[in-house]
Amino acid sequence: PLANSNAARDIGSVLHPYTDLVAHQEIGPVVITRGKGVRVWDDTGRDYIEAVAGLWCASLGFDNERLVEAAARQMRQLPFYHGFTAKSHEPMIELAEMLLARAPVPMHRVFFANSGSEANDTAIKMVWYYNNAIGRPQKKKLIGRVKGYHGITLAASSLTGLVNNHRSFDVPLPGFVHTMTPHHYHEARPGESEEAFADRCAEALEALILAEGPDTVAAMWAEPIMGAGGVIVPPRGYFPKIQAVLRKYDVLLVADEVICGFGRTGNYWGTQTFDMQPDIVTCAKALSAAFLPISAVMVNARVFEGLARESHVIGTFGHGYTYSGHPVPAAVAVETLKIYDEIDIVGHVRAVAPTMQAGLRSRFADHPLVGEVRGIGLIGAVELVADKETRANFDPSRKIAARAAKLCEQHGVISRALPGDSLGFSPPLIINEAEIDEMLDRVRAALDELAVQ
Ligand code: PLP
């Protein structure tokens, strides 16, 4: 890579997110220069199927003239305006209306931010503000889940339950606690059914709330499917059981739809796939098909009324980003949601999901390195294990998932190495059946090569 000038310039200048910064000095980057459909090309001309849609986000693939036009049109019309002090503009209004019309459960108002992390940070502050508003300022603790991912700002990374997002960063902040991962494959007892395991997850949550003091616990955050933690699909009946506990102690549920929102799981929202009834929903990524950064927080009437009342006492809802509801990403998001309707994105995901899910299972369930194949809709993972019998993962020093992902790259697929030795897949939602087969065949070739190393 050092012979390549882009790589050398990168090594000498960029501090990369989520990268071993020392190894990077030797190995260098893959420099992506263009994209079309589900594929991207690097600066050596090599093509890859983008099996994770970038970062679970490029839902419409890597080119779309309508989104380009929507951005250009809005830039010419009004390149910037904001929502502070009751200013507004058409793209922000239209996008808020469209989101409320599509919400998984009745929602009342929409707040805009720029990233999933900011959306979750905003929702955290809203929960605190709300509890102040209704006269219970002591009810402030927040529950995340081990292996949950909610972003990396200080508060969002405190909700996140992944060690690498905590270590050396001095988070989680006080007041953030984590309940168990609902991963049947690893966490269930021998012979325990999914339903019995889900009961045990709910009991663990209740025990945590009781230990912390129910009067001090404000909200729980959950991704419908844990994405960055390893594509962990909850056991049957999990969320209704979790929510029964939350209701008992008047703890709000925040659904983090940053990955699952907009069709990924075969419904418009992951919330619908897993029977969640959230009070607040955060979303980002596919909201704008990742063409521009934008995120949203939807709140129900109960939460909104609390926020409104408190803001009236204080004189302002003292929270907002310069680019909250920026008109250009908002216009792109409006166009994205229109495209989803026109191409029936949910219908398409349901039509091709069996090729992805059955294809993952037929190619990998019996693979010597694979312990579990999991997923739903257009999201999935294969987990690599050292011992299929005991389900033990590899020694972390072998970095098996990272090696698998590198081999996939050499076979022309960009996948994602996830914690717990898993390889994650969440291709652009527009992927067709032939492309899914090609993607999975390439991954199979990569894992076969890994198996004989
Ligand atoms: N929530 C979930 C479920 C995510 O997967 C992510 C990012 O991957 C985030 C929040 C954070 O979003 P962002 O990276 O846009 O801050």
Image (spheres, grey):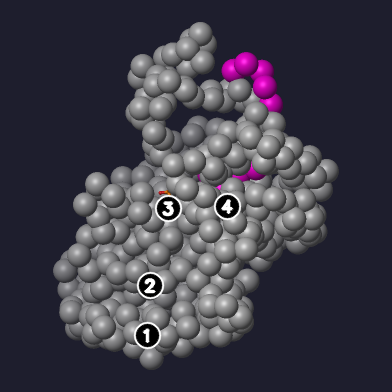
Tell me, yes or no, whether the two marked residues, 3 and 1, touch with CB atoms within 8 Å. Answer: no
Q: Alpha-carbon distance for marks 3 and 4?
A: 34 Å
Provide residue 162's location: percent of width, then percent of height.
38, 56
Q: Earlier in the sequence, mark 4 or mark 1?
A: 1
Q: Which residues are magenta?
A: 43-57
**The disc label shown at residue 386, or none:** 4
Provide residue 152's location: percent of width, then percent of height.
34, 50
Give the quarter of the figure containing the C terminus: top right
Q: Earlier in the sequence, mark 3 or mark 4?
A: 3
Q: SS at mark 3?
A: helix
Provide residue 100's location: percent of width, then percent of height.
52, 67
Q: Earlier in the sequence, mark 3 or mark 1?
A: 3
Residue with the mark numbered 2: 179
Q: Is residue 129 left or right of residue 185?
A: left
Residue with the mark numbered 3: 116
Looking at the image, which residue is at 40% across and 27% down?
23
Tell me, yes or no, whether the two marked residues, 1 and 2, touch with CB atoms within 8 Å. Answer: no
Q: Residues within 10 Å of mark 4 (few under 14, many from 20)?
A: some
Residue with the mark numbered 1: 206
Q: Earlier in the sequence, mark 4 or mark 2?
A: 2
Looking at the image, which residue is at 69% across and 50% down?
368
| Residue type (three-letter) at the residue carrying disc 1 | Glu
